[in-house]
Image: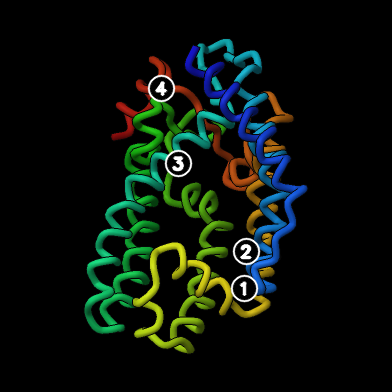
């Protein structure tokens, strides 16, 4: 019931986001306009594919292992982002009152901390907090627990995007007035930074968005619900059932 309700909501979002294509409002910034046009194209397809995925027949192996559909995986990622984005935002808001190096240093170090924490949780438990809440776990193709090699391969593309984005953000922060930046509201700060991004960083963000979309498409068209990064690392995402719980208990 939950999956079908989620599917209806996602498809509804997809249909609603289609209407955004017909509203062409220029912001005056080429960077912001490019990102707005990108989301107009990607989001209708992304939400619709995720929604349709909720109505697919579940695939269970002979051993009783159920592969996880893309909408549930996306929801677990959303939960992960909320768990860490909210406290990060609150701390950043407080640090805006202080010197630039505290705000900037926290932003960079927090991002590194999250990646290290993710790697630790995936090696130790096969899941991040969002996946734990959704009762799903990541295993190797042979149903054994992941090691550091699989985790790093699985995270490799996202780490590359993160590294390029961090380099770009450093260059942007070093070129702006921190006094002007902290005088802006939350949304205005985001738009202000986006307007200052170099062309190559906008290109990276665009490619990253298409990468995310391609991950959903690949998951949709294979029985084991593997994304591209699953193929790179040789992993699968399954529901926490007796079989997967047994594997984890033997390795923890």
The residue indicated by pointer 2 is 205
Q: CA distance from mark 3 to mark 2?
A: 19 Å
Q: Position of residue 181 (x, y in %)?
A: 40, 79
Asked which quadrant contains residue 226, the reply is top right
Question: Going by the image, does 183 lie left or right of 141?
Answer: left
Q: In the depicted view, which residue is nearer to us: 125 or 3?
A: 3
Q: CA distance from mark 4 to mark 1?
A: 39 Å
- State if disc 2 and disc 1 touch (CB < 8 Å): yes
Q: Earlier in the sequence, mark 3 or mark 2?
A: 3
Q: Earlier in the sequence, mark 3 or mark 1?
A: 3
Residue at the spot x=43%, y=31% of the render? 137
Secondary structure found at label 1: helix
Q: Earlier in the sequence, mark 4 or mark 2?
A: 2
Q: In the depicted view, which residue is nearer to us: 45 or 221?
A: 45
Residue 37, compared with residue 233, is above or below; it is below
Q: In the depicted view, which residue is nearer to us: 46 or 132?
A: 46
Secondary structure found at label 3: helix
Residue at the spot x=53%, y=18% of the render? 5
Residue 180, compared with residue 111, is above or below; it is below
- State if disc 2 and disc 4 touch (CB < 8 Å): no
* Res. 224 in view: no
Q: Earlier in the sequence, mark 4 or mark 1?
A: 1
Question: Going by the image, does 157 lie left or right of 90?
Answer: right
The residue indicated by pointer 1 is 201
Please tell me how many numbered marks the rendered image carries: 4
Q: Which mark is residue 78?
A: 3
Q: CA distance from mark 4 to mark 2?
A: 34 Å
Secondary structure found at label 4: loop
Question: Going by the image, does 5 lie left or right of 89?
Answer: right
| Other residues around mark 1 within 10 Å, as few (<14) / some (14–19) / many (≥20) | some
């Amino acid at each position: 019931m939950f999956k079908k309700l989620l599917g209806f909501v996602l498809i509804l979002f997809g249909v609603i986001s289609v209407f955004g294509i017909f509203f062409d409002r220029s912001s005056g910034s080429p960077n912001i306009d490019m990102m707005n046009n990108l989301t107009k194209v990607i989001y209708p397809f992304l939400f619709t594919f995720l929604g349709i995925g909720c109505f697919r027949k579940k695939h269970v192996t002979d051993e009783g292992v159920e592969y996880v559909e893309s909408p549930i995986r996306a929801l677990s990622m959303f939960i992960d982002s909320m768990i860490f984005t909210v406290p990060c935002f609150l701390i950043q808001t407080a640090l805006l009152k202080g010197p630039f190096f505290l705000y900037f240093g926290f932003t960079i170090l927090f991002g590194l901390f999250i990646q290290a924490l993710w790697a630790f949780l995936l090696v130790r438990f096969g899941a991040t907090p969002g996946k734990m809440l959704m009762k799903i776990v990541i295993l190797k193709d042979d149903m054994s627990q992941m090691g550091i090699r699989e985790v790093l391969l699985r995270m490799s593309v996202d780490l590359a995007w993160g590294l390029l984005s961090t380099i770009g953000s450093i260059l942007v922060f070093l070129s702006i007035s921190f006094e002007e930046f902290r005088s802006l509201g939350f949304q205005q700060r985001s738009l202000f930074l986006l307007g200052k991004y170099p062309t190559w960083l906008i290109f990276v963000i665009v490619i990253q968005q298409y990468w995310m979309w391609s991950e959903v498409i690949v998951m949709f068209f294979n029985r084991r619900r593997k994304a591209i990064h699953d193929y790179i690392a040789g992993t699968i995402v399954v529901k926490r059932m007796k079989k997967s719980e047994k594997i984890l208990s033997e390795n923890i």
